[in-house]
């Protein structure tokens, strides 16, 4: 069963989604600041996004709708291709370790 998130009818829908890649990084969290609340006065009314700028860092940043820029299709493709190549290199290294272990076990 797919998890469901319900958004109250009087809230606008977020422009961005969890897991979406943006120029600022990967969206890993979303929160809504209702009007006339302390959070809205502090950060602005509406959706606020938690973004992981670098997957190898613990740092996260927070942005409002108007601060986030979408990636172009070409930029998304480029990021995905780079990630695929990184994973392929990792797979090759693991395969080499497996060959080394298997060879050592057969010769020993």
Image (cartoon, grey):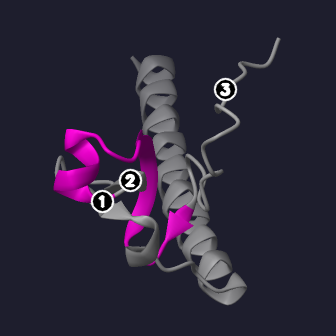
Query: In the current view of this chain or complex, which residue is farthest to the right?
Result: 1
**Marks 3 and 2: CB-CB under 8 Å?**
no
Residue under the image location 52 percent in, 37 percent down: 99
| CB within 8 Å, label 1 to label 3 | no
At mark 3, the secondary structure is loop
How far, Cα to Cα, is label 2 from label 1? 9 Å
Image quarter of residue 3: top right
Given residues 58 and 22, the one toward you in this image is 22
Front: mark 1 or 3: 1
Whether residue 60 is visible, yes or no, is no
Label drawn at residue 108: none
Q: Where the C terminus falls, by quadrant?
A: top left
Where does the magenta region start and end? Answer: 21-44
Residue 5 tag number: 3
Where's residue 56, x and y in %? 26, 54
Q: Looking at the image, can residue 37 be seen?
A: yes
Where residue 73 sits: x, y (%)? 71, 83
* Image vertical order of residue 17 relative to residue 73, above or below: above
Q: Residue at x 45, y 43 (%)?
A: 30
Q: Is residue 37 magenta?
A: yes
Q: Is residue 84 above or below residue 1?
A: below
Left or right: 80 in relation to 2: left
Per the image, the residue denoted by label 1 is 44
Rate crowding at label 2 as few (under 14), some (14 to 19) or many (20 or more) other CA atoms within 10 Å.
many
In the foreground, 69 or 45: 45
Mark closer to the observer (2, 1): 1
In the displayed structure image, the side of residue 51 where residue 80 appears, left or right: right
Density class for disc 1 (Cα within 10 Å; few <14, some 14-19, many ≥20) is some
Secondary structure beneath disc 1? loop
Mark number, residue 48: 2
């Amino acid at each position: 069963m797919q998890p469901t998130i319900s958004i109250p009818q009087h809230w606008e829908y977020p422009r961005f989604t969890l897991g979406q890649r943006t120029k600022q990084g990967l969206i890993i969290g979303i929160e809504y600041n209702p009007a006339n609340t302390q959070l809205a006065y502090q950060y602005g009314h509406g959706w606020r996004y938690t973004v992981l700028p670098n997957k190898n860092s613990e740092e996260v940043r927070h942005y409002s709708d108007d601060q986030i820029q979408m990636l172009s299709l070409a930029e998304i493709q480029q990021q995905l291709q780079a990630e695929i190549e990184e994973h392929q290199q990792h797979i090759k290294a693991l395969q080499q370790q497996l060959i080394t272990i298997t060879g050592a076990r057969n010769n020993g």
